[in-house]
Image (spheres, grey):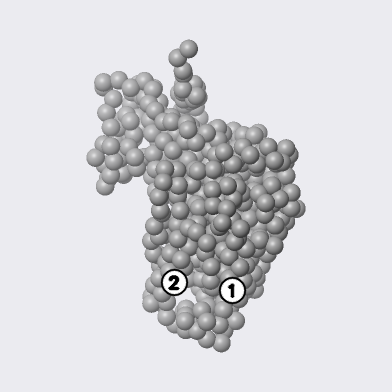
């Protein structure tokens, strides 16, 4: 008998899952973490809170399954990407971590492109305020006394690894999102580091996500009731790569569509894919000799939640979706529905425009909450279609695609997405477990519980959503209206 622990450091909570040797969920736990916004555009967290939340989540798992926890054989880690955690030479945190959704360093993004003319070729990505590298330029400019003390820069899950083991290690998938990695060769790039006045010694060691990165320290093992045990910790992965491992999206063309706060289209590849000028993220996968392409729409389920709050449906989002379905059942009304541009928090793919704004076009007095809800669901589908166009241009379109995330609970929205993307979408069993489940799988491989292919298999499919070709002409006409809404017309 054996068990395996997966821990995911999210933006709003830290989650832990315990699996048995057959990947059956034994227990799960979670604890919230707070996002600090001390100034406009700033988004920070206290790394100590990640550690305390992880301890609470693991304690919940232990409390639910004390005997099975004693059989722990491996640990895997996952986490939010890009967030800069700065440590001094004693391993102490120098300042709050600057998160992936922090927008303060737009100036530094342009500066990086000026310092390294072939930056996008070297990093396989373009610069964005959310990524790690420009954050360090900002710290150097605005907090030079802190910058001078930096001994290590870690990502959130890697800070948790440091607290679990005492070792400074990262994996390829998470490190690809720093803009310091040679993604094709899977190693740090000294030119990219030098552009930020950083050295390779300030980076963690690199391993593949399914390799052993460290072992649980004796102190933590004793605290967890595992004294005398040598328990391996896998390299782990960034949250999206870990989610892909969790649903078996590990072969060329395997993809998933995540409907969370943002919308993500992720495709596994057997080669590096790169199209930075159209905001394609070309990253390493969490498994060796695998990469992935990823496109992001910044507002997905969050756009629906925004409308639900405005229309009094904040506690009945499903009811709002049902009103959208009823509205759209009348073909004439559907064709005359308003069109929604979903850029409530700017947009990433394909525009890379943090200042992009949202809006409705074609609103009339007869439009009710159902009409607005249909427009929002459709507008998010249009934004994801933009991302799919980018993947196609990079020759990385998914051959199969699974649905994950909270938004995937709506069968109506899933069907609309399949129609818009002209792509069959599969809803797997256990889609809500996500990155922590994938992290536990990586822990299993690292611990020798089986091969990558045997452990990272695809789950059973609960439902398939096939595209309805009869809806394509109307959707194409409405998408043309949507595309005309960006950028907004200006008076001349």
Image depth: mark 2 or mark 1 in front: 1
Residue at left 48%, top 50%? Answer: 404
Q: Is residue 190 visible?
A: yes
Seen in the picture, residue 189 relative to 15 is either above or below; the reply is above
Seen in the picture, residue 61 relative to 347 is either above or below; the reply is below
> Looking at the picture, how far across and down is residue 53, in whole percent?
42, 66
Q: Residue furthest toward the left?
A: 312
**Of residues 392 and 101, which is closer to you in this image?**
101
**Of residues 179 and 76, which is closer to you in this image?**
179
Query: Quadrant of the rendered structure where residue 88 is?
Result: bottom right
**Of residues 407 and 214, which is closer to you in this image?**
214
Residue at left 30%, top 32%? Answer: 370
Local SS, label 2: helix
Earlier residue among tags 2 and 1: 2
Number of numbered labels in the structure image:
2
- Residue corresponding to mark 1: 166
- Residue corresponding to mark 2: 55
Evaluate if marks 2 and 1 touch, with contact meaning CB atoms under 8 Å apart.
Answer: no
> Looking at the picture, how far across and down is residue 270, in whole percent?
71, 50
Residue at left 69%, top 43%? Answer: 124
- Report whether 305 appears left or right of 388: left
> Looking at the picture, how far across and down is residue 13, in whole percent?
42, 59
- Report whether 193 appears left or right of 64: right
Residue at left 50%, top 52%? Answer: 99
Sort mark 1 into few (<14), some (14-19) or many (20+) by Cα contacts within 10 Å: some
**Of residues 86 and 424, which is closer to you in this image?**
86
> Looking at the picture, how far across and down is residue 218, in whole percent?
55, 82
Q: Is residue 392 visible?
A: no
Distance, label 2 to label 1, CA atoms, is 16 Å
Q: Residue furthest toward the bottom?
A: 228
Local SS, label 1: loop
């Amino acid at each position: 008998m054996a068990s395996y622990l997966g821990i995911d450091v999210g933006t709003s909570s830290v989650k832990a899952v315990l699996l048995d040797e057959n990947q059956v969920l034994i227990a799960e736990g979670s604890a919230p973490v707070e996002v600090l916004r001390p100034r406009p555009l700033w988004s920070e967290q206290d790394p100590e809170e990640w550690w305390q939340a992880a301890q609470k989540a693991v304690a919940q798992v232990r409390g639910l399954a004390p005997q099975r926890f004693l059989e722990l054989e491996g640990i895997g880690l996952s986490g939010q990407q890009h967030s800069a955690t700065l440590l001094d030479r004693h391993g102490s945190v120098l300042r709050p971590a600057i998160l992936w959704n922090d927008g303060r360093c737009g100036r530094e993004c342009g500066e990086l492109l000026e310092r390294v003319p072939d930056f996008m070729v070297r990093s396989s990505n373009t610069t964005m305020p959310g990524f790690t590298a420009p954050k360090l330029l900002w710290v150097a400019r605005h907090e030079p006394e802190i910058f001078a003390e930096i001994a290590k820069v870690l990502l959130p899950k890697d800070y948790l690894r440091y607290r679990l083991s005492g070792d400074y290690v990262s994996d390829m998938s998470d490190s690809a999102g720093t803009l310091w990695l040679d993604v094709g060769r899977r190693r740090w790039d000294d030119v990219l580091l030098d552009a930020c006045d950083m050295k390779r010694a300030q980076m963690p060691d690199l391993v593949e996500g399914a390799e052993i990165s460290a072992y649980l320290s004796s102190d933590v093992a004793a605290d967890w009731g595992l004294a005398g045990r040598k328990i391996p910790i896998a390299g782990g992965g960034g949250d999206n790569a870990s989610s892909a491992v969790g649903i078996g999206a590990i072969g060329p063309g395997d993809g998933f569509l995540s409907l969370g706060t943002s919308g993500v289209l992720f495709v596994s590849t057997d080669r590096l894919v790169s199209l930075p000028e159209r905001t394609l993220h070309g990253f390493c996968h969490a498994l060796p000799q695998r990469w992935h392409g990823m496109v992001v729409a910044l507002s997905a389920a969050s756009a629906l939640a925004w409308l639900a709050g405005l229309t009094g449906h904040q506690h009945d989002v499903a009811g709002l979706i049902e009103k959208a379905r009823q509205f759209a059942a009348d073909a004439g009304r559907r064709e005359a529905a308003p069109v929604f541009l979903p850029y409530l928090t700017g947009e990433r793919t394909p525009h890379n425009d943090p200042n992009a704004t949202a809006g409705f076009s074609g609103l009339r007095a007869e439009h009710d909450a159902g009409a607005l809800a249909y427009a929002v669901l459709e507008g998010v589908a249009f934004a994801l279609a933009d991302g799919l166009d980018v993947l196609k241009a990079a020759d990385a379109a998914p051959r199969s695609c699974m649905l994950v995330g909270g938004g995937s609970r709506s069968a109506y929205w899933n069907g609309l997405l399949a129609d818009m993307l002209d792509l069959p979408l599969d809803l797997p069993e256990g889609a809500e477990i996500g990155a922590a489940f994938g992290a536990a799988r990586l822990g299993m491989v690292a611990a020798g519980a089986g091969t990558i292919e045997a452990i990272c298999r695809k789950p059973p499919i609960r439902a398939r959503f096939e595209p309805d070709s009869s809806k394509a002409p109307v959707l194409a006409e409405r998408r043309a209206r949507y595309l005309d809404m960006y950028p907004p017309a200006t008076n001349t």
